[in-house]
Image: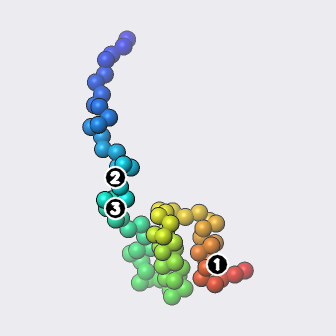
Amino acid sequence: MSQDLEFESPAAFPDRRAVPPADRPVVERRQFADGLDLLSAEARELAVAVDNYKRAHRRRFITHEEMVGVIKSLGYHK
């Protein structure tokens, strides 16, 4: 049994990807935003470095390799 379904035209749905970057709202993507005051100095330094990395690279999440890179950029080594 075939039914004719009515679909809205594609123009009815805004394509958010088509909005120029300058017109996009700025959204903070900070993982540790609410708990920085509760962290030790070392953990706070790492959280800020991760947040800065994510902002600079427009990433919401980072990979393990990127995390190692952030940690090494702070001067830590094995």
Query: Element under label 3?
Result: helix
Query: Element under label 2?
Result: loop
Q: Nearer the viewer, residue 67 or 43?
A: 67
Mark 1–mark 2 distance (CA, rounded to whole Å): 36 Å
Residue on which the image places disc 3: 22
Does residue 47 show up?
Answer: no
Query: Element under label 1?
Result: helix
Residue on which the image places disc 1: 72
* 57 relative to 24 in the view: left or right: right
Q: Amino acid at mark 2?
A: Val
Q: Nearer the viewer, residue 70 or 47?
A: 70
Q: Amino acid at mark 3?
A: Ala
Residue displayed at 42% across by 66% down: 29
Mark 1–mark 3 distance (CA, rounded to whole Å): 32 Å
Mark 3–mark 2 distance (CA, rounded to whole Å): 8 Å
Q: Residues within 10 Å of mark 3 (few under 14, many from 20)?
A: few
- Res 26 quadrant in image: bottom left
